[in-house]
C-alpha cells in the first residue's frame, strides 16, 4: 500500500458550496514527478485499501477518507481528531 500526499485539488467553481472536488493531485510517493486522479478513483483506492491519501499539515499527516452524500455520491474528506474536516479545500488548484 502506497501513501499519496494531496497538495492540490480541482473544483470547477471554488466559491460554490454546491460544486464538488472533481480531482486531486500531489507529488508521487517515489519523488519522481506528480500524480493526479479523479475523486471516484481515489475513493475506490481508499475503499479497496490499495492506497492511502493524506494532506500534510506541518509535521502531521491528516488522512483522507470516503463519505457518501445524501444523494448517494461518494466524496473524499479529511478526518482528524475524531471529526471530518475540510482541509482539502485549503489546497491549491491543480
Image (cartoon, helix red, strand yellow):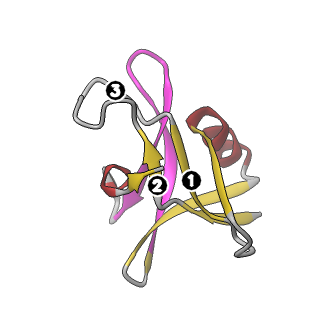
Residue that label 1 marks: 25
Residue 29 vertical placement versus 68 (above, below): below
Residue 64 falls within the magenta-colored stretch: yes
- Image x and y of residue 63, in percent: 49, 62
Extent of the magenta region: 61-80
User: Looking at this view, is 25 or 83 the one in front?
Assistant: 25
Q: Is residue 2 visible?
A: yes
Mark 2 or mark 3: name the one nearer the start of the chain.
Answer: 2
Label 2 residue SS: strand
Mark 1, Cα crowd under 10 Å, few <14 / some 14-19 / many 20+, is many
User: Looking at this view, is 69 or 56 the one in front?
Assistant: 56
Residue 87 vertical placement versus 71 (above, below): below
Question: Looking at the rendering, in which quadrant would you find the N terminus?
Answer: bottom right
Label number found at residue 19: 3
The answer to whether 18 appears left or right of 32 in the picture is left
User: Looking at this view, is 16 or 70 the one in front?
Assistant: 16
Label 3 residue SS: loop
Label number found at residue 8: 2
Mark 1 or mark 2: name the one nearer the start of the chain.
Answer: 2
Count the marks. Answer: 3
Q: Residue at x 52, y 59 (%)?
A: 6
Mark 3 or mark 1: name the one nearer the start of the chain.
Answer: 3
Determine whether label 1 and label 2 are within 8 Å by CB.
yes
Q: Residue at x 75, y 74 (%)?
A: 30
Amino acid at each position: 500500500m502506497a501513501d499519496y500526499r494531496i497538495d492540490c485539488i480541482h473544483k470547477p467553481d471554488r466559491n460554490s458550496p454546491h460544486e464538488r472536488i472533481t480531482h486531486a493531485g500531489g507529488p508521487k510517493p517515489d519523488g519522481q514527478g506528480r500524480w493526479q486522479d479523479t475523486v471516484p478513483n481515489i475513493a475506490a483506492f481508499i475503499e479497496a485499501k490499495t492506497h492511502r491519501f493524506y494532506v500534510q499539515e506541518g509535521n502531521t499527516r491528516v488522512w483522507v477518507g470516503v463519505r457518501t452524500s445524501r444523494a448517494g455520491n461518494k466524496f473524499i474528506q479529511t478526518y482528524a481528531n475524531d471529526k471530518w474536516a475540510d482541509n482539502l479545500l485549503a489546497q491549491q488548484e491543480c
